[in-house]
Image (tube, rainbow, N blue to C red):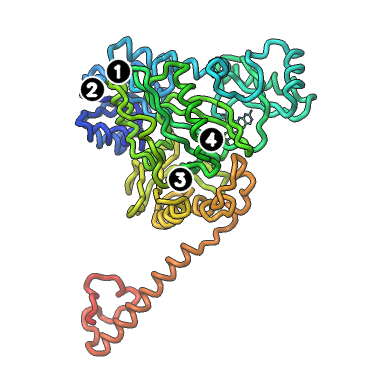
Amino acid sequence: MIKKILVANRGEIAIRVMRSCREMGIATVAVFSEADRSSLHVRYADEAYFIGPSPSNESYLVIDRIIKAAKDSGADAIHPGYGFLSENAVFSDRCKKEGIIFIGPPAHAISTMGDKITARETMIAAGVPVVPGTKEAISDEQEAAKTAAKIGLPVMIKASAGGGGKGMRLVKEEKNLLDAIRGARSEALSAFGDDSVYIEKYIESPHHIEFQILADKHGNAVHLCERECSVQRRHQKVIEETPSPLMTPELREKMGQDAVAAARAVNYEGAGTIEFLTDNDRNYYFLEMNTRLQVEHPITEEVTGVDLVKQQILIASGEKLSLRQEGIVQSGHAIECRIYAEDPDNQFMPSPGRIRYMTEPSGPGIRTDGYVYEGYEIPLYYDPMISKLIAWAETRRDAIERMKRALREYKIGGLKTSINFLEKVMNNKAFTEGKYDTHFIDENIDSLMAARDGQTNQDEDLAIITAFMDYHEKLQKSQALQPYQSNGGSSPWKHFGRKQGVMRM
Ligand code: MV4
């Protein structure tokens, strides 16, 4: 039985994890850096431990400090959230050695999937389709040229230690192959300390479709259907939805089975995600596995009704999965928009700063997973994501309308945000028709950036102006009956809105 969980993270995900803990009657421990002294995850927790300076490599990434906080607090488990130490095999192993439950997969699953060449090999052995390409690291450059010719150009050179777009090169012409290999190698060596690279056939206009899986310590594994994550910019996801507009029941069944096979092949435990590239003919290929809870997990929760964090905790406690594959059905449609403190009009530069005012959307079918409050200053040390806005409705069309309504309700003052950009995506034809792939933002950047059509904001300004005019007109009428005495003849414009100026009707 887990009684107390230390959450080795910050921001919205730390709070998200603690919410499930609280519902389960589990005590929570926060850790925080200098920059996070006034962060909400610290106030939310039952207790909190200071772990060092603001830069994450001096606080959230220091294994010894996290372990010490866990020991000092008497926590029997650690939840790593996403990012930071969540996919660190050394950390998973260290927790085990210290007698602390790591709420995540064992070290062997993390390292097998972390090495992309080993992951590909493991998937091939398990019968899961991978992108056509080399099975082993490229050793000889002449051999590489032959392989590329055999696969057929264009190809991608990828770093085995990479992932998420780091250390990748696209090669369209044979004459660029060797330079690309050398470039990818040196980039990989300096970024990861490992210069192994491999070759894959380039999939021209892929969709990024991923499957959520859960696996317990007793050999049971299920999938919780897909998430469509093709709306991304520079390998940063912007919008995710489920079901995928590209999905069919037959394809879901096949991909789901392969996702479960992928998890079984590494004796996976906990929540994980199998990423696939899918082409327009609905061929699909294993890309990589994320051995953690993901940012976009809420959309899966909204359509399946499963609390993924609770499942992670139950699995880590050693319980058998209570879910059966037949019992997992998607109901309705869910979309997530990531709200960032960034300026779309200035190359999406981060825009950290103080939240001067804020009104968050709510109402039917709306969920926000966030951590900021009015007066809070978003630190420049970490990811600039402010919150995740999730809309659920019966149909995709209704979910889009609901998201548009919620984006319009969302008011954040004091810094630049991506809210206006997201509204444009929701109004984009390719998006509303569900005909988009991973090139969507690049291909539509002009119309998504165009000077705001601003209809929504103008409507609101107009509403405020007409409200004032109506008030003022009625105020004057009531003054005609009963002239002013109290304000000494000051301008009615100043008078408007003042407490002592309550009019009689
Ligand atoms: C690819 C690809 C096309 N063909 N591999 C980008 C992130 C990394 N995880 C793998 N990525 C890609 N690998 C082959 N063989 C296209 C991408 C890719 C991409 C993939 C998923 C989501 C967005 C993307 C954006 C650009 C490129």
Q: Is residue 358 left or right of residue 453?
A: left
Q: CA distance from mark 4 to mark 2?
A: 38 Å
Q: Identify residue for label 2.
A: 2
Residue at (24, 84) in percent of width and height: 484
Q: Identify residue for label 4.
A: 251
Of the two numbered discs 1 and 4 in the rendering, the one whose residue sits closer to the viewer: 4
User: Closer to the N terminus: mark 4 or mark 2?
Assistant: 2
Amino acid at circle 3 = Cys
Amino acid at circle 4 = Leu
* Above or below, comparing residue 500 to residue 197 in the picture: below
Question: Closest to the observer: 218 or 17?
Answer: 218
Image coordinates of residue 260 in percent, x first then y, are 45, 25
Image coordinates of residue 499 in percent, x first then y, are 23, 70
User: Closer to the N terminus: mark 4 or mark 3?
Assistant: 4
Q: Quadrant of residue 18?
A: top left
Q: CA distance from mark 3 to mark 1?
A: 32 Å
Of the two numbered discs 4 and 2 in the rendering, the one whose residue sits closer to the viewer: 4
Q: Residues within 10 Å of mark 1 (few under 14, many from 20)?
A: many
Q: Identify residue for label 1.
A: 101
Q: Is residue 323 left or right of residue 129?
A: left
Is disc 4 in contact with disc 2, using a CB cutoff of under 8 Å?
no
Image coordinates of residue 47 in percent, x first then y, are 22, 29
The quadrant in which the C terminus is found is: bottom left
The quadrant in which the N terminus is found is: top left
Residue at (35, 47) in percent of width and height: 367
Q: Identify residue for label 3.
A: 337
